[in-house]
Amino acid sequence: MILALESSCDESAVALFSPERGLAGEWIASQIATHARHGGVVPDLAAREHLRHFGPLLQQAQREVGFSAVTLVAVTHGPGLAPCLALGVAAAQALGRSLHVPVAGVNHLRGHVWSAFLPVHAAAPADFAARAAELLPHLGLVVSGGNTLLFTLDRERRVTVLASTRDDAAGEALDKGAKLLGLGYPGGPLIERVARSGRPDAFAFPRGIGARSDLGFSFSGLKTSLRYRIEKMTPAEVARDLPDLCSSYQEAVVDALERKTGLALEQGGGAFRSLGLSGGVANNGPLRDRLAALAKRERVAFLASRPEHTGDNAGMIAFAAWADPACRPAENLQIVPGLALEGN
């Protein structure tokens, strides 16, 4: 069994995973309410909250499932906020010593990569290897507050990045847009909620598409466009048009993500057998619907992370530690806040 810890940002999470049976348990302490008062994540405050929460979470996991079958401790060691990562790695190393088992560092983004395959494993744990092989090569889209990237997963389970964002990530753009509109934090879910009663074509916001063959993303211009739009409106007009503003802004993000993903599938020349969606923004309803429809049109399987595994969670870290051949135990595990996806 694998015991995993996640502390890359503002979620303290613990999970236990068995290759034969799947996830035996997941425990998480969210800091959203704490950081909402500041309009975003405060790194030092987040680290303090991790220190406060990890002890009780681990005690609960030990009480409900137990650590007697643990053979590996896995922990996120990057990318993320350095003080938060350091606390998680220190806790994992202490657990490894006390349980006399090795410790493996897991790339947080690789956790998102493999989270889309967790439902495949849950459906038939014993047949996962064969079922996963049928879904490779795989094209995946990771969309979160800090990252937006397209990647491939080949038949040897090697990850290659095709494209990423040149500036703001999609989730960051949604959060900043929500702040400009006075909606609060976290912004993505709030924009989606207000957008339900608005028109996606009410305002023309830029897509940052670039050249036809370019897979790269750009969302900074979108955020600037919203700011200029709001500056030309009175507070009463912003309040009146808030649903339309949210819907049009969200549509610009979703449309850019769908177009680039579709272009990547096209450039693959029919080689891909599945399309994945993961990361915090993968919980966005319109985005899930549009990519599911895209996968159906292209006749590839659609693998979307379950809602509980779209944000920061330890379940995906435990699973990646088992499924990803790049994840190996290390004697002297170091945090790497800016770790690239290709490396572990």
Image (spheres, grey):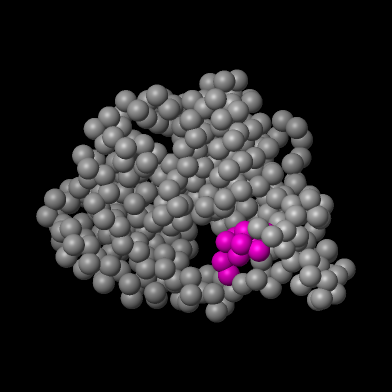
Image quarter of residue 180: bottom right
Residue drawn at the location 16% of the way across and 65% of the way down: 63
User: Where's residue 313, x and y in %?
Assistant: 39, 56
User: Where's residue 269, x and y in %?
Assistant: 60, 20
Out of 317 and 81, give the one closest to the viewer: 317
Q: Which residues are magenta?
A: 185-195
Whether residue 107 is in magenta: the answer is: no
Q: How many marks on residues? A: 0
User: Where's residue 172, x and y in %?
Assistant: 62, 59
Residue 134 visible in the current orientation: yes
Image quarter of residue 247: bottom right
Q: Residue furthest bottom?
A: 37
Q: Residue furthest left?
A: 68
In-image side of 336 versus 275 (left or right) = left
Q: Residue furthest front?
A: 197
Q: Is residue 251 above or below residue 50?
A: above
Residue drawn at the location 41% of the way across and 64% of the way down: 11
User: Where's residue 78, x and y in %?
Assistant: 43, 54
Rendered-image quadrant of the C terminus: top left
Residue drawn at the location 72% of the way across and 58% of the way down: 198
Residue 110 visible in the current orientation: no
Q: Is residue 324 above or below residue 330?
A: above
Residue drawn at the location 58% of the way across and 43% of the way down: 289
Q: Which secondary structure is most common in the magenta stretch?
A: helix
Out of 245 and 98, give the one closest to the viewer: 245
